[in-house]
Image (cartoon, coloured by chain):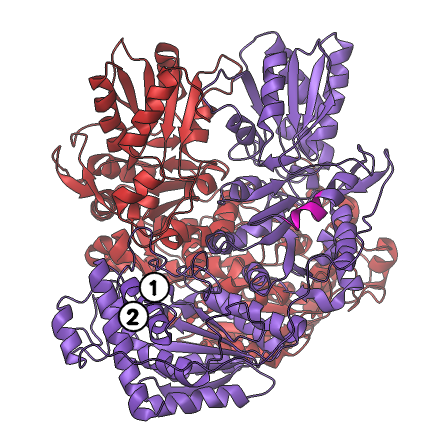
Chain colours: A red, B purple
Amino acid sequence: MNTGELVELGQQLRVDSIRAAAAAGSGHPTSSMSAADLMAVLFARHFRYDFERPDHPGNDRFVLSKGHASPLMYATYKATGAIDDEELLTFRKSGSRLEGHPTPRQLPWVETATGSLGQGLPVGVGIALAGKRLDHADYRVWVLCGDSELAEGSVWEAAEHAAYEHLDNLTLIVDVNRLGQRGPTRHGHDLDAYARRFQAFGWHTVEVDGHDVDAVDRAYGEADSTKGQPTAILARTLKGKGVEAVQDREGLHGKPLPEAEEAIEELGGPRDLRIPVRQPSPAPAPPAGHTGHLDLPRWDKGEEVATRNAFGEALTALGTARGDIVALDGEVGDSTRAEFFAKEHPERYIECYIAEQQMVAAAVGVAARGRTPYASTFAAFLTRAHDFIRMASVSGSGINLVGSHAGVAIGQDGPSQMGLEDLAMMRAVHGSTVLYPCDANQTARLVAAMADLDGIRYLRTSRGESPVVYGPDEEFPVGGSKVLRSSDRDRLTLVAAGVTVPEALAAADALEGEGIAVRVIDLYSVKPVDRETLRTAAEETGCLVTVEDHHPEGGLGDAVLDAFADGRPVPRLVRLAVRNMPGSASPDEQLHAAGIDAESIAAAGRLLVGEAIVA
Amino acid sequence: MNTGELVELGQQLRVDSIRAAAAAGSGHPTSSMSAADLMAVLFARHFRYDFERPDHPGNDRFVLSKGHASPLMYATYKATGAIDDEELLTFRKSGSRLEGHPTPRQLPWVETATGSLGQGLPVGVGIALAGKRLDHADYRVWVLCGDSELAEGSVWEAAEHAAYEHLDNLTLIVDVNRLGQRGPTRHGHDLDAYARRFQAFGWHTVEVDGHDVDAVDRAYGEADSTKGQPTAILARTLKGKGVEAVQDREGLHGKPLPEAEEAIEELGGPRDLRIPVRQPSPAPAPPAGHTGHLDLPRWDKGEEVATRNAFGEALTALGTARGDIVALDGEVGDSTRAEFFAKEHPERYIECYIAEQQMVAAAVGVAARGRTPYASTFAAFLTRAHDFIRMASVSGSGINLVGSHAGVAIGQDGPSQMGLEDLAMMRAVHGSTVLYPCDANQTARLVAAMADLDGIRYLRTSRGESPVVYGPDEEFPVGGSKVLRSSDRDRLTLVAAGVTVPEALAAADALEGEGIAVRVIDLYSVKPVDRETLRTAAEETGCLVTVEDHHPEGGLGDAVLDAFADGRPVPRLVRLAVRNMPGSASPDEQLHAAGIDAESIAAAGRLLVGEAIVA
């Protein structure tokens, strides 16, 4: 396409953005119009992509970080022929693939869901890392973001990571239209302000008039030929460009154009230009899941092993068996034990330093390139990436997250380091799996099993050593549980997981000595939960005590209750959890202070069996 | 103190850090030793503080962002006379005020809990904002952070905010000891790399040898005299400085020194220097809570009003009545309606742009200065600040958070914009209050009530209009609920909140028409929950249906179950919640697709009353 055609294409994308939003009665046409020329030049002259084969390993990758500009994305798809005009006008309607903000769940050309700002670049960095370090392919990653979202710290985590890894296959296009949702941005049209920041972080920068298609074309060419560092193109644009009534005006964010027909006329009316998208180069396919024999570590019953260690060893073994396994960590690999993997498979270990948002985003990025990532840090610090985990779920991304140092059992370090909200956070993620092993063999099996699940999978590990309860050949299906003690005389069921399993067993011993037979269930699969075993235990023993090293809300206790919310009779129950704000103390002191040690469990059991009221 | 004394003081702080960690058997002495000279000079020559009056309004404020260097903090307290040597050696022991990471819960000189890295500067920015914009006092804010934590994006959100607001009362001291937990940082001792970044963000920078006390003294002086911008002091230091066996060596993070006695001897043995801390200047006290008559907005029953609008109006009225009210928003004030407050009280409105971590941190900062902050954004985007909310709770900070655009009821914008995990996140925060009003008058009352609560308080608002159910004089105690329909024939109780209240009422109408009398409870206080009313309803009607615009985990349904986890009999129940991943659709279509509209509620009610099994 020549200059004149590119200009026309930009106008077409504007017109179609306006038409889509008008048909929907909502959406963000003005945010689309500012970036229309940037998209026109990118897709017509630089982007290499086979729309028939979105899984082509040589495809360039495009991420629309400013996801609210979805009309522009869909108008571009129409111009490539990927969708037709009829579908374009289904925008935002029930059942349409063209959602308010793009997601890959139904659109194979979308790499990651966006709409929470400041996430496109971090995920783009993950894809670019995959291209450079894992795929060794020459595809490029293009991210289009807004200027407002540069206020998000996650953008600077990504900027830092990209420059450090010399990701010259990554280009960030910033649509500097100077207007946020509520009003002007901090820096308006001061492109230099943004350029200084990116340069300081080690990026190459280009400043350009975002409505001058030839200048934009040259900027993309400069990005393409820049070696050793990523490029940020800072494009001066006008929100609502091309329609006098809305151009560069405040108060029009996220609204269809008031006079759509006149606006379309002002832009020269509808067009039907077709973009001849460049084809990708051949590239090798990503590695298959199973490439070798899985030789998981094994421990003997009675050994004392921390589950975090078992995680590290199992992940290392899994990495040996499968070329698709990638590990990421937030500069605490010596604590999480991801370091074991790093030593054995350095080429598939991504050190994310202390930047948990970028770590999860990088996991989403490498998952988009066919890998199976395991991202680990302290359970407490995964809360830093909550919004990224939420959005990964919207994407339907398949990632494994591992949180170590769970609960008060870590001891002296105190509450800032204790994961006490992680089960609540991870359970509430749509379609998630939440696993919490109590011993080394169980951990190893679950680490291997989670690799093949869908969606967001979470494994919670513990800092301290704990006794090996299970033999190395025991199986632990996801959604299952283990009945560790059982008799037909049981008057009570204790439900525990992780560090509370040994406590529950000790409590059961104590109660047994007093003539109270007790069932003990190891609920290692917190979500999905083993409803059948819980229901049976409730029916046979009449009452339950749940015990967890977590705040009382959203964790194991709530997971157990989930088994009984089906309208059938519910057992009497008591939930033991961490209701205090811990300070520093030894692990045993902490468990006791929180009321989740063997002594506290036994006391609750006695009360419940005596039919006393506990609360 | 002269140069020689400052050098000696630095050595004393090292020795006492080693002694504290040795007594505890854990802790981070090497991270303390690198910053000992920086602390010695700060407290002996620049910091103005009355240790007898930590609430003195003219006090400078110090934040130890690298909270793991707590031994250094406590050694400094000892040198000021605030604690004695005996207490120093209680470090990390059960019951001690000297926790593994500092918190203000027991130590009045600590401004905010730290230990999750990258949070000290953001909170420091909040305190400095209070000093400049609210207190109009000349106290200074000093933040000491590590180099590793500069990888956290939250640091750059803070850097951006501080420079934009010209916070020349803020000094960041970076202890560049080049070693993180696991190994070297990305930039090692390259001070220029950090200086470039801060300069690009608009900061003044000073590079200094962090062990040259005179140079450090001059750097602090330069920070003090720099006008119009904040200063970052980049100090080259050595981890474990002064003890050959550990100095500048890897693999020694977070461990007591192996040979403490020898190390103390190498440092010249214990000393007992006392720091003559400079006294603060007089300053006005922050405003009291109640400074005028509260004239809340009022609506008539039957009006259609969005609860987000009621929030905006009520907050504005509250701000008129109380000078301590401060509003913060993440550049969506036109959507959350915080903008109403901004127009009326611009001097107490802090625009945080799209930086939710910084927004919550700034709220914590102004709360530390005696204000009552309300920080608002979309409920979904509060997940971005989860770790900050968690740490605010560890601090015991009193802040109000308001999340708008809750649930699938927002309609077309799709899942990226829908708060569907916020109740789970906020309920799991220790000591939190979670409120979810269904109408405008209820919202206004709760906005006013939450101002006087302790801890983290959360209000969930809705995007769309809904009918006013309650009169303007109705009262809504926190921890209460409202029984909206009741008879002695009730065979079922529907428990709803927010947008599901009108749906539940419509379902009750439908069931009543079929001869099934139904009780309806508006559970506006999700935490604490009204156990008594729920228990009574359960006993009288036999079964419950909960219905919420939230994922099934951790929200309203779990809150209701909490009322029955006391060992007494539990009612049969069914929980309706958002179990699908929504796409784009109208609000009504969304509620129906999620199975939480009146029709779905009535269907569940019929099944439950018929004693059928639902799940």
Q: Along the horizontal axis of the image, is B329 left or right of B432?
A: right
Q: Position of residue B73 (x, y in %)?
A: 36, 69
Q: Is residue A352 visible?
A: yes
The amino acid at mark 2 is Ser
Relative height, residue A366 to residue B578 (above, below): below
The answer to which image quadrant residue B30 occupies is: bottom left
Q: Chain letter of disc 1?
A: B
Q: Position of residue A319 (x, y in %)?
A: 24, 48
Residue A56 falls inside the magenta stretch: no
Task: Please name the residue shown 31% across and 40% down the image.
Answer: A591
Residue, disc 2: B31
Q: State whether the magenta stretch is mostly helix, strand or loop.
A: helix
Q: Chain letter of disc 2?
A: B
Task: Please name the residue shown 43% across and 70% down the image.
Answer: A160
Task: Please name the residue shown 37% across and 15% down the image.
Answer: A610
User: Which segment did they paint magenta?
Assistant: B446-452
